[in-house]
Amino acid sequence: MNDERHVLIVEDDEVSSARLAGYIEAAGYRVTEVSDGKKMADTLENDPADLILLDINLPGEDGIDLTRQIRSRSNVGIILVTARTDEVDRIVGLEIGADDYVTKPFNPRELLARVKSLLRRIRANQNPDWPMKRFNGWTLDSRTRALSNNKNDRMHLTRAEFELLDALVGNPGMVMTRDRLLNKITHRSWDPTDRTIDVLVRRVRHKIEINPKKPEIIKTAHGEGYIFTAELEEY
């Protein structure tokens, strides 16, 4: 069993929802199925979830709108369930705070790998033992997943943004390939069409760089990946 961790499936197609639920329940998780955003909100209010499998193409408010709403008040894990033609929506979903995605038709093993990986990361982030790190006027606290400036103003990071920045800060001066970064964040192998890391880097740059178009903290290693180049002080 998996400590009765709760997975909420938001999917309006009954067949797809039942298939998803079957895979997740077989792995030992508790599953709730709902068909729209209103039922999702009602469920979360009365029975908080550890992870949400959220279909993008829902009637009424779609998965993108719902992701934005969820992220405004919660750090619950979100995996978008998308069609293969939804590349733009996947990128937008990541930009507004989704943690990962699976594409239809999906492989059951890949789906479970995504779910287990995200739940492990959530648990690890709840009990980290790494020190705080300071750079360029910023302090990254891995214990609370918080980023703050010298005035103690907190900058919100999504889980994926935090894990990207933590991976880069933890390897200063080293070229971190997209493949290595993606594996650390989602345990997914990178391919040339996958823009997940580039999207996350752009989002983080907009939060920590004075001029995101001319970054001084996270620089691009053309054709390879990214480098954290700021001077790092651990304490």
Image (tube, rainbow, N blue to C red):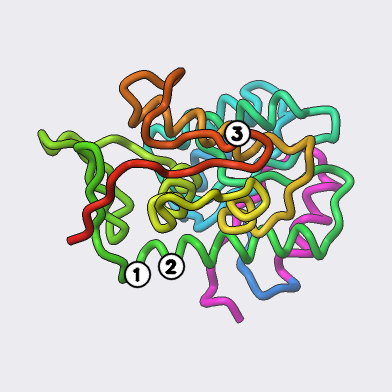
Q: Give me the residue at 78% from left, 28% from top.
A: 86
Q: Do the residues labelled 1 and 3 touch (CB within 8 Å)?
A: no
Location of the C terminus by quadrant is: bottom left
Write the start and end of the magenta stretch as one range. 1-25
Which quarter of the figure has residue 21?
A: bottom right
Does residue 65 sit above or below 158 in this rendering? above
Tell whether 235 sits left or right of 31.
Answer: left
How many angstroms separate mark 1 from mark 2 (CA)?
5 Å
Give the image location of residue 65, x and y in percent.
57, 25
Q: Circle 1 sits in a helix, a strand or a loop, which is it?
A: loop
N-terminal label among 1 and 3: 1
Q: Name the residue under label 3.
A: 198
Question: Which amino acid lies under the numbered mark 3 shown in the image of this protein?
Answer: Asp
Rate crowding at label 3 as few (under 14), some (14 to 19) or many (20 or more) other CA atoms within 10 Å: some
Q: Circle 2 sits in a helix, a strand or a loop, which is it?
A: helix
Q: Do the residues labelled 1 and 2 touch (CB within 8 Å)?
A: yes
Give the label on residue 127, or none.
1
Q: Nearer the viewer, residue 233 or 116?
A: 233
